[in-house]
Image: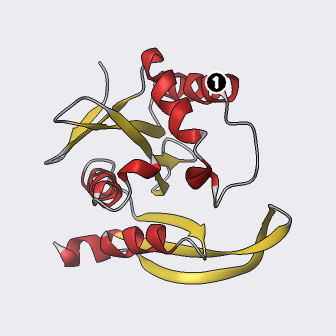
Amino acid sequence: MPFVLRTSRLLLRDFLPGDLGSLAAYRQDPLYQRYLPARPAGDADSRELLERFIGWQEEEPRTRFQLAIVLSSSGELIGSAGLRRRAPDSLVADLGFELAPSFWGHGYATEAARALVEYGFSELRLHRIHAHCIAENDASARVLERVGMRKEGVMRDHEFFRERWWDVHWYGMLESDFLEAR
């Protein structure tokens, strides 16, 4: 049975083979690629990524939830969000999200991330969820802070791409933080 989380405006669901066109389209947008290493983002690369996401759905027990972000009103795929554990018994998970640039600034990333944080602490019974973003990516940092994550540190010159070094901000949230904020 496909995995689905619903929010007021979004459907976070397992990826389907038919999602390739939408996934490839936003991954090729230069704005989307701004804080990522230069790499192929064409149909072949997106197909490989989509196949990986679909393959994760077969894990038993499931440790990785990489979900399509879909507008409930139209059914349009606008991004991806994920919660990933290293092992089935791990009480720690990594949170990530991405949106097509044409949907930035509408609160969709926050809504999707909040749903995954809720699922992680309430259903998976996680102890900790963490995330990271390029230090200059203020929009992603704001999303992480809006869902209750705390900035825990900076890894200076942690990533090298696009012919320069980038600092990375690390964020985290404990189950006790989540419960206190409820």
Give the quarter of the image for residue 12.
Answer: top left
Give the quarter of the image for residue 11.
Answer: top left
Mark 1: which amino acid?
Answer: Asp
Report how many numbered discs are placed on residues in the image: 1
Q: Is residue 99 left or right of residue 125?
A: right
Q: Is residue 76 left or right of residue 98?
A: left
* Residue wearing tag 1: 43
Vertical relation: 70 (above or below) 8: above
Q: Label 1's element?
A: helix
Q: Depth check: 168 or 174 in front?
A: 168
Q: Residue at x 34, y 62 (%)?
A: 105
List the single residue furthest toward the right. Answer: 163
In the image, residue 35 lies at what x, y percent? 64, 61
Rate crowding at label 1 as few (under 14), some (14 to 19) or many (20 or more) other CA atoms within 10 Å. Answer: some
Q: Quadrant of the C terminus?
A: bottom left
Vertical relation: 47 (above or below) 182: above
In the image, residue 43 lies at what x, y percent? 64, 24
Colouring mode (rainbow / by chain / secondary structure / one colour):
secondary structure
